[in-house]
Amino acid sequence: MEDCEAILEYVYYSCRKEGAAWFSYHFTPIFESPTSHNAFIWARGYPLKLQKRYFGEGYRQIDPVPRLTLEHGHILTWRKAMQLAKGDPTAKQYIEEFGIENWAGFALYGPRNRDAFAALTFLEDPELFEEGRLAHLHTLLQTAHLQICKVMDNAEPEVILSTREREVLTWMGRGKSATETAEILNISPETVKT
């Protein structure tokens, strides 16, 4: 695939077949942290209320999970994150307060320090999965990330707007904020900003 959106949609539906209910992909800009305001986040399945809380109440900037995942291995389950957070009161409070269980974070490494983080939330505890299931998902996510990096390297400077991008620009051109535009189009404010 040569389109980043198509790659992410394919990965999302592949992960759903593996039992994932929610999916997010966080592309970290070079020399920035995974929680940087400039990090690109693509998400599917998350309830709008949760998205508003994550982006609107500042949880994005303090989310310890991308950092913990990138620092402590390729795959980090929520149980392991809770263990790691015991020594970090801010991380522990975030994980408990945000209240999402049954997730796994995946560290994704790319060329020239173009790293990313993916999170999958499941209906069941991923630590109880059969051996190799999370590793299989990690391989899928890592391969997709490398393809996205390749597509970005080969991207042409010409800008062609999708129908949805035109809709976003139209509403913003009418003076609507990102939040208002998101509500009108029934998408997340982060998607509007992206």
Image (spheres, rainbow, N blue to C red):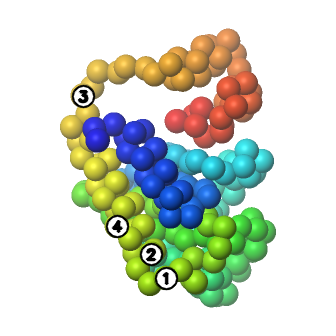
What quarter of the picture does the N terminus occupy? top left
* Position of residue 183 in the picture relative to residue 14 (left or right): right
As measured in the structure, the alpha-carbon distance from the residue carrying label 2 to the one carrying label 1 is 6 Å
Q: Which mark is residue 156?
A: 3
Gap between marks 2 and 4 measured at Cα: 10 Å
Q: Is residue 67 visible?
A: no
Q: Which mark is residue 139?
A: 4
At 27% from the left and 25% from the top, the residue drawn is: 157
Real-space Cα distance between discs 1 and 4?
A: 16 Å
Q: Earlier in the sequence, mark 2 or mark 3?
A: 2
Mark 2 burial class by Cα count in 10 Å: few <14, some 14-19, many 20+: some
Residue 187 appears in the rendering: yes
Residue 154 occupies which quadrant of the picture? top left
- Amino acid carrying label 4: it is Thr
What's the residue type where badge 3 is placed?
Glu
Q: Earlier in the sequence, mark 3 or mark 1?
A: 1
